[in-house]
Image (cartoon, rainbow, N blue to C red):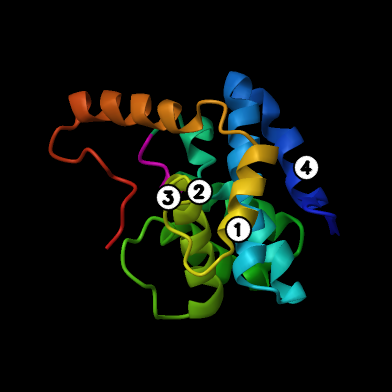
């Protein structure tokens, strides 16, 4: 379902969540699409493209659906419900792992290690503003960032993290997994 560098799964799913995401819609859409494109830079297997699209849409969605920065489990729950509803139950475990481990700092080397590791790296490429490239072509990363501007996504996350730090000083980064 890829059209050029855009993906119909991403476009259609995000349109459904636009009312929930609200004013953050375009910044999240651009982040999701950049992460998806980063996946394609790291993995050219056509059979994985749709999996990356679903994981990209759902990986942070709990921020809005559950109004929390502790969003991994809420994001996984939304993804599982959606995938089961469209008859993709056999993808749930793999996409769940992509979402759960996408902030892991060190290499992931367990079940579905290829796709989970690609997705982890793809998100880190975007979160690091391309400083981390994991072998992806820096000019392509830069091109994606130019085509899909940040629109304050990182500042949005920093504000959310700041509020969480004040509420939960002993757990300021609940979305990070080891």
Residue 163 disc label: none
Residue 11 disc label: 4
Residue 73 disc label: 3
Residue at the disc numbered 1: 38
**Mark closer to the observer (4, 2):** 2
Marks 2 and 1 close (CB-CB < 8 Å): yes
Is residue 140 shown above or below 33? below
> Which x, y percent locates residue 99?
49, 57
Secondary structure type for disc 3: helix
Marks 3 and 1 close (CB-CB < 8 Å): no
Residue 116 or 31: which is nearer the viewer? 31
Query: Residue, x 59% and y 63% (percent of image)?
Result: 137
Query: Residue, x 70% and y 74% (percent of image)?
Result: 44
Question: How many circles with numbers are drawn on the protein?
Answer: 4
**Mark closer to the observer (3, 4):** 4
Of labels 4 and 1, earlier in sequence is 4
Of labels 2 and 1, earlier in sequence is 1
As drawn, the residue found furthest toward the left would be: 170
Instruction: Point out the image quarter for the C terminus.
Output: bottom left
Q: Main secondary structure of the magenta part?
A: loop
Q: Is residue 23 left or right of residue 154?
A: right
**Mark closer to the observer (2, 3):** 2
> Which x, y percent locates residue 43?
63, 72
Of labels 2 and 3, earlier in sequence is 3
Residue at the disc numbered 2: 126
| Disc 3/disc 4 C-alpha distance (Å) | 23 Å
> Which x, y percent locates residue 49?
72, 66
Of labels 4 and 2, earlier in sequence is 4
């Amino acid at each position: 379902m890829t059209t050029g560098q855009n993906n119909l799964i991403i476009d259609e799913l995000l349109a459904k969540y636009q009312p929930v995401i609200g004013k953050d819609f375009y910044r999240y859409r651009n982040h999701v699409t950049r992460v998806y494109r980063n996946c394609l830079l790291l993995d050219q297997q056509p059979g994985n493209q749709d999996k990356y699209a679903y994981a990209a849409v759902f990986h942070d969605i709990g921020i809005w659906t559950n109004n929390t920065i502790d969003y991994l489990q809420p994001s996984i729950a939304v993804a599982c419900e959606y995938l089961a509803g469209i008859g993709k139950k056999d993808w749930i475990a793999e996409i769940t792992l992509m979402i759960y481990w996408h902030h892991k700092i060190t290499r992931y080397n367990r079940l579905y290690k290829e796709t989970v590791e690609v997705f982890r790296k793809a998100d880190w490429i975007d979160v690091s503003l391309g400083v981390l490239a994991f072998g992806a072509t820096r000019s392509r990363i830069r091109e994606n960032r130019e085509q899909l501007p940040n629109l304050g996504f990182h500042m949005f996350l920093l504000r959310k993290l700041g509020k969480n730090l004040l509420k939960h000083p002993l757990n300021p980064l609940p979305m990070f997994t080891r």
